[in-house]
Amino acid sequence: MTLLELENRQSLIVNTLRARRHKSVRPRRLRTTAALRAMVRETELNARDFIYPLFVRHGTGRSEIRSMPGVYQLSVAESVQEAESAARSGVNAVILFGIPKEKDPIGLENFSEDGIVQQAIRAIKKEIPEMVVVTDVCLCEYTDHGHCGILNTSEHYHTGLPEGYVLNDPTLDVLAKVAISHAECGADIVAPSGMMDGMVSAIRDGLDFAGYENLPILSYAVKYASSFYGPFRDAAEGAPKFGDRKSHQMDPANVREALREAALDVEEGADMLMVKPALAYLDVIRVVKDAFPEMPMAAYNVSGEYSMIKAAAANGWVDEEKVTLETLTAIKRAGADLIITYHAVDAAKWLK
Ligand code: PBG
């Protein structure tokens, strides 16, 4: 082949390839400027999407949680302050967790008129009436054994079950009492997190009977037995004293089961659904949202997910602001309408 022939042949190849290229289709056109990118953005985070968790304890002042930098156990007065700072940044919902003065096998403070959460609900609603106060309804922070329900003991009549097993139906009665007690203090939404079968209908019946038929239930419908709750158990002092939560929380390997859990809660009258944790479960959020597009969906960006970002950021390995906003955007893109996140106030400020 002569040099000329070779050149002709090469240019033929190049021209053929060029002609084949879809010159008319260039996705990069819409990425050329920030203004264009903003016009075609599909997912937009908003401070209104966030629910900010608060840990309330007896006593005065606040104490930082070792495994969750920037998150505190708060006195009632401090929880009002924290809710006020959330409101100022544009976050309009908080979720309350209580650390009781004393723990016992049933968790009596959980439905006591002077319980710590009861005090905090009243105080926050008094100072910031427009703040949406959500309450976590579970037993684990209140029981001396740290489990999410009443345990089977030798005195119990539940002979077919092992000692220490979390009894489902006796627990439902307590959950209904707790929800009613929160409602009486002015809670706006109750959020059962214990993964007991029938918890939504038990709470719905209790609330309706007590005259709170308009109080919505945000069900932790799809909650996994996750190791990402580690830091939370420091924060809420609710680690199980023995065993684990696998007899009621879901196996991380399952997604079809999530649809079954969600369907049951919808049938029982849940007003909103939740998937928890969020980040390792984005596929679950998507599947549940697609199956129940009519249901408002929350995702819980849990303690371990928060602390991982904090730890990496403290080492200078990631940019906290950027990684957090990217994470929250991903959770929303996956299908969550609402996100429970310890980053709520920071993220709201960064979005401004
Ligand atoms: C149970 C409850 C837990 C969390 C929220 N509600 C802990 C658990 O199930 O063990 C975890 C939240 C987090 O890790 O941020 N009341």
Image: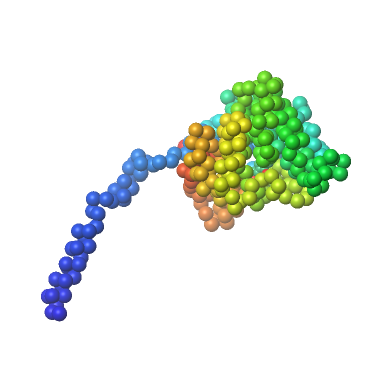
Is residue 195 or residue 137 the one in the foreground? 195
Please tell me which residue is depicted at 12% across the width and 75% down the height of the picture. 4
**Colour option used:** rainbow
Please tell me which residue is depicted at 63% across the width and 22% down the height of the picture. 213
Please tell me which residue is depicted at 61% across the width and 35% down the height of the picture. 265
Q: Is residue 129 left or right of residue 160?
A: left
Q: Quadrant of residue 183?
A: top right
Image coords of residue 106 (percent x, y): 80, 37
Question: In the rendered image of this protein, does residue 32 appear above or below residue 93?
Answer: below
Which quadrant would the N terminus be assigned to in this image?
A: bottom left
Q: Quadrant of residue 153?
A: top right
Image coords of residue 53 (percent x, y): 62, 38
Is residue 136 or residue 69 the one in the foreground? 136
**Residue 81 in sight from this viewpoint:** no
Is residue 221 or residue 159 the one in the foreground? 159
Question: In the rendered image of this protein, does residue 334 appear above or below residue 184?
Answer: below
Q: Quadrant of residue 216?
A: top right
Image coords of residue 290 (percent x, y): 48, 40
